[in-house]
Amino acid sequence: MRSEEETCRAIKQYGDMVRRICLVHLKNHADTEDIFQTVFLKYALSSVSFETQEHEKAWILRVTANACKDLLKNVFRSRTVPLDLLTEQAPELPEESREVLEAVLSLPPRYKDAVYLHYYEGYSAAEIGTILHKNTNTVYTLLNRARKLLKKELEGGTEHA
């Protein structure tokens, strides 16, 4: 079990990142807050000793992604309709950014993690592979396919406008 000071430090250091990951996956503020609490409760109760800060960050990323996936697998969740992220969570975004966010959120789930970690957190493909337990070449493939899907979605959106 970790001290209160150590847990508070982790929340300050990684809290925004955890919330962003949850919003990308869940598109719902209430579920995001639930997962946020779950992640840091697991952190506080965990006896894992971290070798480096990167190891700690990777552990938090993995716990967050797994908790989001577990929530999405929940039977109750499949019978409810999520709140619209763009109207409630990000009304201050410019129109272009809103279109990009909509396109990223419409990606199949297997691409979202790789796209988020690469473009929003700045991880390399090798680091993403380690975090997601995937081969580096698989990460490159996921990013390439995601870029193609995003390009198709964004170009398609401008033609119809």
Image: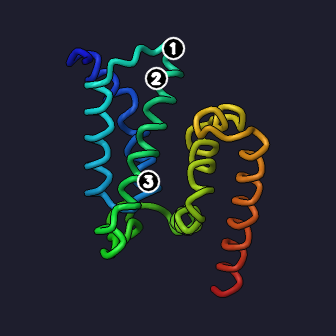
Q: Which mark is residue 19?
A: none
Q: Tell me the kind of residue under disc 3.
A: Lys
Q: Earlier in the sequence, mark 2 or mark 3?
A: 2
Residue placed at 34% from the left, 70% from the top? 82
Question: Alpha carbon of mark 1 to alpha carbon of mark 2: how far?
Answer: 6 Å
Question: Measured along the vertical axis of the image, is residue 134 above or below residue 83?
Answer: above
Q: Which mark is residue 52?
A: 1
Drawn side of residue 50 relative to residue 138, left or right = left
Question: Measured along the vertical axis of the image, is residue 156 above or below residue 67?
Answer: below
Residue placed at 40% from the left, 51% from the top? 68
Question: Measured along the vertical axis of the image, is residue 62 above or below residue 97?
Answer: above
Image quadrant containing the N terminus: top left
Q: Residues within 10 Å of mark 2 (few under 14, many from 20)?
A: some
**Contact (Cβ within 8 Å) of mark 1 with mark 2:** yes
SS label for mark 2: helix
**Percent position of residue 70, x then y:** 39, 53
Q: Which residue is mark 3?
A: 69
Question: Measured along the vertical axis of the image, is residue 103 above or below residue 9?
Answer: below
Drawn side of residue 159 relative to residue 116, left or right = right
Q: Tell me the kind of residue under disc 1.
A: Thr
Residue situated furthest left in the rendering: 4
Question: Alpha carbon of mark 2 to alpha carbon of mark 3: how far?
Answer: 20 Å
